[in-house]
């Protein structure tokens, strides 16, 4: 939600110029994201300055953005209160003769990447703005992504570019220091009292999360995939605000396609949603097609949506019809996830012979994939990474994302629920059943995913892209993170079939990383 350039030991006299904050010597600048759901304020005690960019909160009046003069005591109080803000935020602190400090809020709604040169700290929610600071590839982070074992940390694919994780602070005074916060403590399942109204508590928690932000300030649309999570949030909003919110979704391929259409149709007929319903065929606008920004050579972060092309088309359609806010179901999986003790299962990203393209340096780095990761947050780390994939595409189109399942109150409710309410998403299923939706919606065992879209991409569009990569080379080869001989063998096997979801699907990450590395470096 912020772009910045901060130069320590220079002027710290800030003014608001109508677009952003700038110092008297113009050596530092802060540009907040311009949106009805984002506000910015600043205070100074004539020595220290605190600049805050944050999500708006419903029922709270807005303040003038120009820096306000306060006493030192009032400044200290403002600094304390800034971290108690109930939605997401970014804090910037400057003072003459001191390093500058940038602290991220707890929500992770928009990513914050930072880099530095000899004089200044640079930051942005769009990694492309920092491309000139990328000096190479991180073997550990690339290895994590190649085997689908993502970790939430300050490290990114590119050496020279870092992520400011939730509640972390970037301190820059000529050298960059990234300080992790204390871990957030979490609870476990609790025993319910007799006749506990779990669905009532769930609806109340949803309402609290939905009412926190003034989404009525801007045109709002709902991501309604037909799944349990977006379906639960979307139906609640339609129930409370009949005929107010239009809907949108990406249409999948394969056996689940007809079922997705059928489920969405029933949900749309049962609850009073607004028109239109924006439905984009993900197969028609397949990832890595020639219209894809990655393939065209644009600087697209490797953390952005893997299905970048269809998600961009959907986002552009929403923006064209005036949407400025999108409400999603992201975080629903993690809210009701089962622990290893409840359901023993393999961890993500186990290296195997099925990934012959993993290069020597990447294999060596896999031993250290859990090193340097961020401490536990209020929100699950996988949810935070998911939010990071979604935000940049939406924000470029002027759309602000809202994720009710990522609200700490929703997360805590999920932690406290006994296993039988979380297993197979019983919480969401029973909530949808309470609305009168049929078993076709609430008891579905049909898998709905983008597996077939990825398969189509790799087995058709992917072949010439792999051939070009193998012929012209790649930074991934140069740094021995991907083995070209192993990749060549995998591509040959992919052409000969049959397609294997576990072992072939990971090749999409190879192409995404290749295009990112080629455009950034």
Image: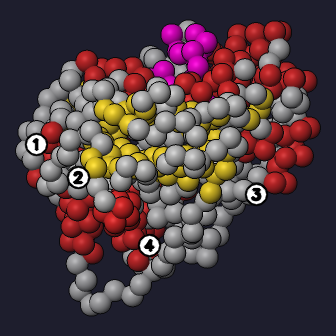
Which residue is the site of mark 3? Answer: 371
Query: What quarter of the picture does the N terminus occupy?
Result: top left
Q: CB of mark 3 within 8 Å of CB of mark 1?
A: no
Q: Which residues are magenta?
A: 291-310
Which residue is the site of mark 4? Answer: 415
Answer whether residue 35 is visible to the viewer in this image: yes
The answer to which of marks 1 and 4 sits earlier in the sequence is: 1
The Cα atoms of the two marked residues, 1 and 4, are separated by 31 Å
63 drawn magenta: no
The answer to which of marks 3 and 1 sits earlier in the sequence is: 1
Could you say whether the residue bearing mark 1 is in a helix, strand or loop?
loop
Which circle, 2 or 4, is nearer the viewer?
A: 2
Which residue is the site of mark 1? Answer: 272
Which circle, 1 or 4, is nearer the viewer?
A: 4
The Cα atoms of the two marked residues, 1 and 2, are separated by 26 Å
The Cα atoms of the two marked residues, 3 and 1, are separated by 49 Å
Which residue is the site of mark 2? Answer: 57
């Amino acid at each position: 939600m912020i772009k910045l350039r901060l130069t320590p030991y220079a002027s710290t006299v800030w003014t608001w110029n109508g677009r952003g904050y700038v110092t008297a010597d113009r050596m530092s600048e802060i540009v907040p994201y311009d949106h009805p759901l984002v506000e910015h304020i600043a205070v100074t005690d004539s020595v220290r300055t605190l600049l805050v960019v944050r999500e708006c909160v419903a029922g709270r009046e807005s303040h003038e953005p120009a820096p306000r003069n306060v006493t030192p005591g009032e400044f200290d109080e403002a600094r304390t209160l800034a971290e108690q803000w109930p939605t997401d935020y970014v804090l910037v602190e400057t003072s003459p003769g001191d390093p500058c400090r940038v602290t991220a809020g707890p929500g992770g709604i928009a990513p914050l990447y930072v880099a530095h040169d000899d004089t200044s700290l640079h930051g942005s929610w769009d990694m492309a703005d920092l491309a000139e600071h990328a000096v190479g590839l991180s073997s550990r982070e690339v290895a994590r992504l190649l085997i689908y074992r993502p970790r939430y940390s300050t490290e990114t694919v590119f050496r020279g570019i870092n992520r400011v994780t939730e509640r972390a602070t970037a301190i820059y005074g000529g050298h960059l220091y990234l300080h992790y916060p204390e871990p957030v403590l979490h609870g476990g399942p609790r025993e319910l009292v007799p006749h506990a109204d779990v669905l009532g508590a769930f609806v109340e928690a949803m309402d609290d999360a939905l009412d926190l932000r003034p989404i009525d300030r801007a045109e709002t649309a709902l991501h309604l995939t037909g799944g349990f999570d977006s379906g639960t949030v979307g139906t609640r909003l339609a129930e409370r605000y009949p005929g107010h919110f239009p809907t949108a979704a990406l249409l999948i391929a394969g056996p689940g396609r007809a079922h997705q259409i059928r489920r969405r149709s029933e949900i749309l007929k049962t609850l009073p949603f607004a028109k239109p319903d924006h439905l984009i065929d993900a197969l028609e606008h397949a990832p890595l097609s020639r219209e894809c920004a990655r393939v065209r050579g644009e600087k697209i972060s490797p953390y952005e949506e893997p299905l970048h092309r269809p998600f961009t088309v959907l986002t552009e359609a929403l923006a064209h019809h005036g949407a400025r806010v999108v409400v999603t179901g992201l975080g629903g999986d993690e809210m009701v996830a089962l622990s290893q003790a409840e359901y023993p299962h393999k961890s993500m990203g186990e290296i195997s012979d099925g990934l012959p393209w993993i290069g020597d340096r990447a294999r060596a780095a896999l031993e250290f994939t859990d090193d340097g990761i961020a401490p536990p947050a209020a929100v699950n780390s996988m949810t935070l990474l998911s939010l990071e994939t979604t935000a940049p595409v939406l924000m470029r189109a002027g759309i602000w994302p809202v994720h009710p399942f990522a609200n700490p109150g929703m997360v805590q409710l999920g932690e406290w629920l006994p296993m039988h309410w979380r297993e197979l998403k019983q919480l969401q299923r029973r909530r949808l059943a309470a609305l009168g939706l049929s078993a076709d919606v609430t008891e579905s065992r049909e898998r709905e995913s983008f597996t077939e879209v990825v398969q189509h991409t790799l087995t058709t569009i992917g072949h010439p892209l792999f051939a070009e990569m193998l012929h012209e080379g790649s930074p991934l080869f140069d740094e021995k993170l991907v083995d070209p001989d192993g990749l060549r063998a995998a591509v040959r096997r992919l052409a000969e079939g049959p397609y294997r979801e576990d072992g072939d699907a990971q090749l999409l990450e190879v192409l995404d990383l290749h295009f990112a590395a080629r455009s950034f470096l």
